[in-house]
Amino acid sequence: MTAQQVEDLIHLGFAAKRKMLAIEEVRPHYVRARLPYRDSMLRPGNVLSGPALFSAADLVMYALVLSHLGPELMAVTANCNINFVAKAKPGDIVGEGRMIKLGRRLAVMEALLYSSAEPETLVAHVTGSYALPVKG
């Protein structure tokens, strides 16, 4: 699937009334996506919140699964582990996802998250898995 097809599928699946994310790049075993900044993402201390970073990571991993399986909207998060490694200054959340293993029942991935305010600073390292629907 193309970046635009994956983006459209996610927005359709969530019945989003406004743009949730932008898929910037899709290639085998890789997705780059951007979650647009909103003031509601901030926590005290003027940093991006954990829930905002989790949302970005989960959407990146979901996009990665869809880019490999096609329109399989029933894939669901099975596990997610986040290591917050730096304060995330306010800005778009940019995520790069990499497929580690795509099996018949489980996809295992990692995501690296950055803030567009400091694009060279890794703010979170995420590992996760998605349960894939049983075919047939």
Image: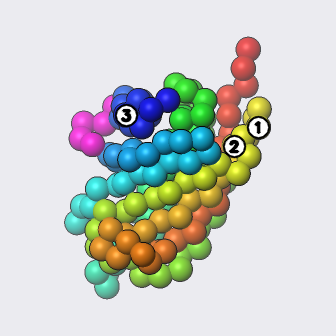
Query: Marks 2 and 1: in contact by CB < 8 Å?
Result: yes
Mark 1 residue element:
loop
Disc 3 residue type?
A: Gln
The residue range painted magenta reads 15-19
Foreground: 110 or 11? 110
Which residue corresponds to the image point at 24% horizontal and 36% vertical from the top-left? 17
Q: Position of residue 30 (x, y in %)?
A: 56, 48
Disc 1 residue type?
A: Gly
In the rendered image, which residue does mark 2 sit on? 107
In the rendered image, which residue does mark 1 sit on? 103
Q: Kindly indicate the quadrant of the structure image that contains residue 56.
A: bottom left
Q: Position of residue 39 (x, y in %)?
A: 22, 66
In the rendered view, tell whether residue 70 sits above or below residue 26.
above
Q: Position of residue 76 (x, y in %)?
A: 60, 40
In the rendered image, which residue does mark 3 sit on? 4
Of tags 3 and 1, the one toward the viewer is 3
Mark 2 residue element:
strand
Mark 3 residue element:
helix
Foreground: 42 or 119? 119
